[in-house]
Amino acid sequence: MAKKTFKGRPLLGGNLEGKALASTQPLNTTGSYLDNLFGGNSTSAPCTDPNNKEFYKKDLSGAILCFTTTVGSSLGGAALMGVGSLGVGPKAMLFSQHVDSVSLAGLLMDDIWNGRRVITIDLLGDEFLESVKTGDPIAIQADGTVEVG
Amino acid sequence: MDRRTFVKLIPMTAMAPGALIAQGGTAEAAAPPPSPAGSGAPEGGAVPDYAGKITYSDMSVTDADGNTQPGFKHSSSKAQQADPKAPYQMPLTKEEQDIMDGKKGEALAKVMKIVVAHGNAFGAPKLVELGGAPHCSLYTGTDYMKPMIDLFQECADAGLKTYAPYTVNPRCYDMYNVNNNATDMELIYQGYRYQRDLDWVHAQLGAPDLNYRSCACYVPEVGNAPPPGTYVAWAESSAINYGNSALGLRTNRNAGGMELLCGLLGKAPLFGLMTDEGRMANWLVEVKTSKEPDLGVLGTAIGLKVIDGVPFITGMEKYLGTEVSNDNMHLLKKMGSATAASGAVGLYHVENLTPDAKQKGRKLLQKGYQTYVYDDAEQARVLSTFPVEWDGRPEDPTVCLIGCPHNTFKEIHDWGTKVTETLEKRGLKTGAIPTKMFCSNVVRDHLVEKHPALVGKMTEAGMRFTNMCTVSYAGMKDFSERTYAVTNSPKTRNYYPACRYLKDDALIEVICTGKIPKGA
């Protein structure tokens, strides 16, 4: 497939290559990790949110997640810290829209306090999410450039 | 018991506020509530027990058309530079930079870095000094909260404290008045393993007294009610909603944890609902009912319609008056909390009543605002979406839940009076079902002090006070299979539709007879 390049805002920058796990629906930070947050699963992170059909039951552990924005409880930040501490958090979160304050709070806390970074880029745009599909090769650069394909 | 089996036993309400499980209200229920669009039957079969209403919370809402929408979008935040994607660093004062550079210790430096980075993302032009006191929504000591609890224990170890003593959400359980049974106790003792650690963190940072635990932190007895215009950093959707709207405070809808970090710093980034621009109304809500609207239905309707917008509500003067006082604060609390539960409303204005509206009137309506008319037909339509039947629930009510958000003094007094007088008139010694009155201990103590005889009668009537969170109770595993709760709270109903919302008169009838009156 032809490569496409998008530029977002690097909130927590970094370089990473891998495969995309994409959804056109919001990511529910609390609803997606119930098996980990309540079951203590520290080997995989099967998505437990049935409302996100593209993510549901897929393994979110170590994923490069591509989605619109995050939703869920105002304790969603704590949830992201929780899965990070279990070692099953995502490696990157790529938002097509503006980041929401709840997930950003947790991501910043885990990065600055615990030294655990999840590469976070927002404002990648609708075309990014229309282009990227699960399984696509993806390359992220520290300046917020994301190459798909 | 292995861990996987345990998953199905622990209270899923631990994700509260705003993200709780309706154990009986999943897609498998025979009489489901309106489901959000896109739910349907998931791939692979049945929805797991615990994947219930946790998706529908104050940060994700179902709009009036049944579509899942993101919640609070910070639409009022604007980039400070021409290219919104360009790196942005808000200017800091010398004092703030010194803190950032570690001159007041490593822990506070990290706190500053987090808060500033957060503000940068939302284009905050600066940090502002906070007044009043913080209100914190970290109240559940579950496993997943451990990293958060550890972070704040490190802050306590470094000697940090909040800029003022602060208030915290209600207790997530009450072993004396509500959960004093073997089933609940097993769930609670196994599910809230770090509750002691969390309580200790709060005691060290500035909130040691559990008697003040309440989501209604602004009632006189609890006392967290700063004057209009005060910048604060609060969390808990109903407290923020009331604080911004009825008190005229200026706070964003903070994530759990961020409010406490701002509290330790004594500063918060200025953006969103803290700004004049962010407090402009993008919806005009015209209340045109032929008589007093049902405030629970009105609040629910507004939240569904505006989602995370700022509504300017008219037509309520004859029902609510022109001054916020101890006589009407509970009405605003009821309506407002519903807007924050069915939607993600962090601020509303009521014409001629709330501080911002009294000061600026309809100048608060921004250009291009939308209009929503709430009349008798619309009230009936929204009320018809509240489920009446619920599969798997006991046939008749088994408990009455009064007070979500927590009751005011006036509410516990009036409810106590109405119920006990009705029982006496009918020659009944006690209620047919128990009633739980949710309020802080200091509000209860106020009633004991002023009306001891009434409290005695309430006890005989089966009315028991508790300082726990109603939503935490209603969200316990298998709650709707063991319990048929009736409630006056539209917020509780929104999160747990198995709890039947009724008007006050109908609830008194249920308390007396154990049966829901016809036509309720």
Image: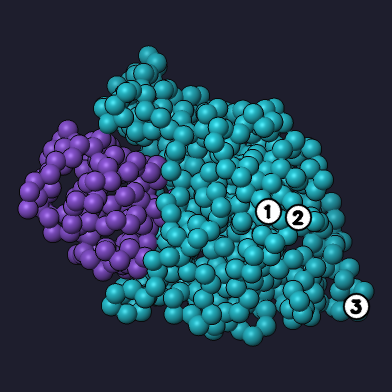
Chain colours: A purple, B cyan
Query: For the residues tagged 1 and 3, is the chain the same?
Result: yes
Q: Secondary structure at mark 3?
A: loop
Query: For the residues tagged 1 and 2, is the chain the same?
Result: yes
Q: Residue at x 39, y 73 (%)?
A: B40
Q: Could you say which is closer to the camera, residue B459 or residue B368?
A: B368
Q: Residue at x 44, y 24 (%)?
A: B127
Q: Which residue is mark 1?
A: B374
Q: Amino acid at mark 1?
A: Tyr
Q: Which residue is mark 2?
A: B289
Residue B447 placement (x, y as % from top left): 79, 54
Residue B338 placement (x, y as % from top left): 61, 55
Q: Which mark is residue B357?
A: none
In the rendered view, tell whether residue A34 sits above or below residue B433.
above
> Circle 3: is it few (<14), some (14-19), or many (20+) Cα within 10 Å?
few
Q: Is residue B98 left or right of residue B336?
A: left
Q: Which mark is residue B426?
A: 3
Marked residue nearer the N-terminal end (1 or 2)? 2
